Amino acid sequence: MRRNRVLACVLAIGFIVGTTPAYAKSPKPTLAQIQAAKNAEAAKRAAANAAAAKLAAANQTLRQLTATADAARARYVRAQQQLAVAVKISQVAALHAQITSAAVNSAHRTIGKLATNAYIMGGGLTDIEPLLSSNGPQDLVDRLSTLSTIGAHNSTALDRYKAAQVVAASAKKAADAAKAAQQAATIEVASAKKIADDAKAAQQAEVDKLQKVQDELMREFASAKKVRVTLEQQRQLALLEEANAKKAAQTPGQKSIWDDRGFKGRASFISTADQRAAAVAYAKKQVLARKPYVWGAQGPNSFDCSGFVYAAYKSAGLSWPYWSRLNAALYSVSTMHVKLNMLIPGDFLFYSYDGTVSNIHHMGIYAGDGMMWEANSTRYGLLYSSIYSVKGMMPFGGRV
């Protein structure tokens, strides 16, 4: 039961530290560095909150200006519609006045001509009877049918036509006045619409500017938070690896290979043969370059044991969420277990000081022929060594 609680604790810690890559310059950050990161994160949070308040106020003003602009736009549309009606009425009145005026002039010329002819030639009403019985305005026909002389006909007909002309001209004048008034109203409404639209556009520009500031501050805050979390995780990981390794060095009676207690890993693996070969090649290159061992480091200039295997497979193309930075114990449960006699290059070797998964303190990458690439210790650095050179090997390997 105690062993299970310890393992659960280690697993929980490992999963926390494994989700975010490390960016700190120091492989094992100090408490002062972590506090400085917390202070920077708090400052960015405060700046982001202040910017968010400004942005919220600006957005509220924008909503109000948008409502005003929308109302002005609606009034402008109605004014345009009313202007179109006024223009149409004015056009109809003008056409009516034009037609009426033309009819008066035509009747005046025709009747005057016929009257002259009648006087000169001595004729009577015979010559104008076609006019009187024509399909002209009904009012004129009714009036002319009661007249007995050319003079009476001419006077009455012209009076009626002139009266119609006055009415038509009056209607045109009223229609033109309505049109002019509506044009003036439309111009006034258009001016109000432009003012509202300009105010809205200016406020939108201000909101866009504030939004950019807010976005940038949020990115800075997220970055500061990531740095702080990474420093905490990196320190926790380094302390855990260091503590396990020191405990292993002080634990006597460790076997070369522990008995199989039935620990299970994943049911499958995710790497390809090419990726495993690339990971081995990367590990070899780091060892030959004589890179140092540093607690909590994962390259490119220094490594600890779990950082070494993480960097090797990351270089081979594995990445989050399928591949993340864990500690040695968690890598043992997040890989597929294979028997030691079935190891292939690229598989992991695990070492525990008491044969349990929770106390795995070291790991390496199998190179083939009973050898491995490993980040051994601060004393020896990175090595190409026998898989039996470290005490307490677990009875299984791990395939990514």
Image (spheres, rainbow, N blue to C red):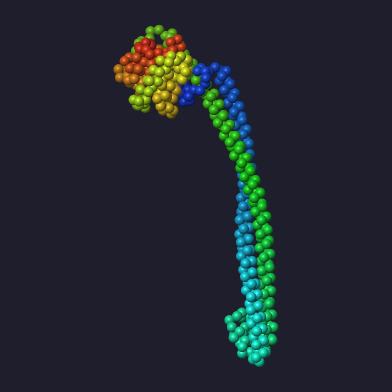
Closer to us: 324 or 337: 324
- The x and y percentages for residue 22 are 49, 22
In the displayed structure image, the side of residue 183 where residue 397 appears, left or right: left
Closer to us: 336 or 47: 47
Extreme bottom residue here?
122
Extreme top residue here?
252
Residue 392 appears in view = no
Q: Residue at x 67, y 70 (%)?
A: 171
When asked about the image quadrant of residue 346, the answer is top left
- The x and y percentages for residue 219 are 55, 31
Extreme front residue here?
120
As drawn, 285 above or below 61 = above
Number of callouts: 0
Q: Quadrant of the N terminus?
A: top left
Q: Quadrant of the C terminus?
A: top left
Closer to us: 144 or 217: 144
As drawn, 140 above or below 11 = below
When asked about the image quadrant of residue 307, the answer is top left
Q: Residue at x 46, y 25 (%)?
A: 19
As drawn, 260 above or below 143 = above
When asked about the image quadrant of residue 215, the answer is top right
- The x and y percentages for residue 317 are 40, 27
Q: Residue at x 66, y 51 (%)?
A: 192
Q: Residue at x 37, y 25 (%)?
A: 275
Residue 47 appears in view = yes
